[in-house]
Amino acid sequence: MKKYIAVFDIGTTAVKGVLIDQQAKIIGEYDTTVETYYGENGEVEQNPADWWEGMKEITQKWWSELNIEAKQVAAITFTGQMEDVISISPAYPNQRAMLYSDNRFGEEAAHIMKRFPNIQAETGNIIRSSTPLAKLLWMKNNKDEIMEHTQCFVFSSKDFSIYKLTNTFVTDPTTAATTGMMNLHTRAWMPEIMEAFGLDANKLPNLYDSGEIVGYVTQSAMEETGFLQHTPVLCGSGDAGATAMGAAAVQQGDTYFYLGTTGWTAMVQENMNHHIQGMFHLAHIVPHLTISIAPLLNAGNVHEWAVDTFASEGTEDKNSAFEALVKGASVGSNGLYFLPYIHGERFPVQDSDAKGAFWGIGPKTSKSDMARAVMEGICFSYKQLTDLIIDSGDKDFLTLMGGGSKSAAWCQILADMMGVSVRVPADSAYMPALGIAVPAFVQLGWAKHHDAVFEQFLVSTEDKIYKPNMFHHEIYEGMYETYLKMYPSLKGMYERK
């Protein structure tokens, strides 16, 4: 009888579920949408019950539409959004979860940083308005009744779902690294931080590695989902850890790019670059390793702006039309440069007032030049942050994930600019699910070590590889120095009087 790992990826827009067999083949790809509540006071919240209902809807499709039998599910694991604050309380069962993007808590974050100015040396990150510790402090000051009656706080959507399946309170080190309450070096909670602000450290979940069995499906959960009672449930990981595993970034120096609406570059390290302002540091699923993340506000959102701006009106497929414009221009965009900070930026510069800009427009500048300059500008931005945190010169390839990887022109520009091959995984949409299945493979004895899973399944012959044109690389190297001068030269115009 064929066996599967059931994987749920609970993001901010949807609950996704897949079944992964012993050959890492995916079936049963279903998803349900999740509604987000935006309040008049800046609230960004979701109802955790919606995550649970989404899971149940997906499992019923497995049983009824695919004729999967519950006994075929060998284990259940998860990945999902992080930096949430979710109160588990029988007295207040319908509390909405405060999401990572709920940034009402700037005053609390500033207060914590004033009290513990060197907290980053232990936690790996400064306290921001999105940090769960700041949210808990706000709850203490504004929702004292709920705080008192909360059994446990969890910090990822997947942690709530594990509770619903097993009646246990757990989280993983990747998720915990976003809370402001875990020591990144020891991977243990720091109760003294909570106690300093009058918070109850006993209401924190237990910490487990991603591949550990944290409980088993209860009878009540069996009745709701159809999973067999006593099916093992693994801890799973926050989405950043699962994505790193899916990208096969598991050794010192391994790197991947994410090119979505916003973007980031992530590098696996033994030690964190806490001296570089603006970076995030998370515990990797692989013990003793850290994921250092440099975020970008301007990526796919800038591409979307450029498509709307430069692709002709009435064109049926504006993305393809824009792609043709980019390919129609020469490398270097006829001497035109583009600074992509149309949404401000947070790395490699921290400037919410920064603006985008074209420089070098001449009488022969074309629409194609402007389209290509936008793409090159975003890639220059990736190169700049990459140069700050990694040495790509000794890498065979860089892995690229996210919606931007669908653009062949964009992938080729990035490969040419970095001077390194760019690998786009064949199943990039399901990379987090495949990534978090890796420790499950090891736990179930389907593989001896995670490296065996990567070698056999995750680095596929179906992956697209974009090899760099080194002549183009030399052109971009010459242009790069001019690009680096753009922001400092224009900064005075951004500054408010």
Image (cartoon, rainbow, N blue to C red):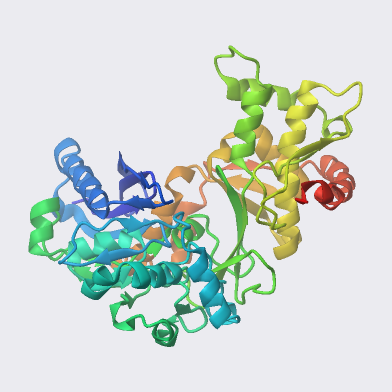
Q: Residue at x 90, y 46 (%)?
A: 478
Q: Nearer the viewer, residue 259 or 41?
A: 41
- Give the quarter of the image for residue 347: bottom right
- Which percent across, then down, holds residue 165? 19, 62
Question: Seen in the image, is 174 located left or right of residue 157?
Answer: right
Q: Residue at x 77, y 45 (%)?
A: 417
Question: Seen in the image, is 416 located left or right of residue 63?
Answer: right
- Which percent across, then down, holds residue 200? 32, 81
- Which percent across, then down, holds residue 354? 72, 48
Q: Residue at x 62, y 77 (%)?
A: 271
Can residue 458 be seen from the camera position used here? yes
- Which percent across, then down, holds residue 106? 52, 64
Furthest residue to the bottom?
Answer: 192
Vertical relation: 156 (above or below) 329: below
Question: Seen in the image, is 79 located left or right of residue 6?
Answer: right
Q: Nearer the viewer, residue 366 or 4?
A: 366
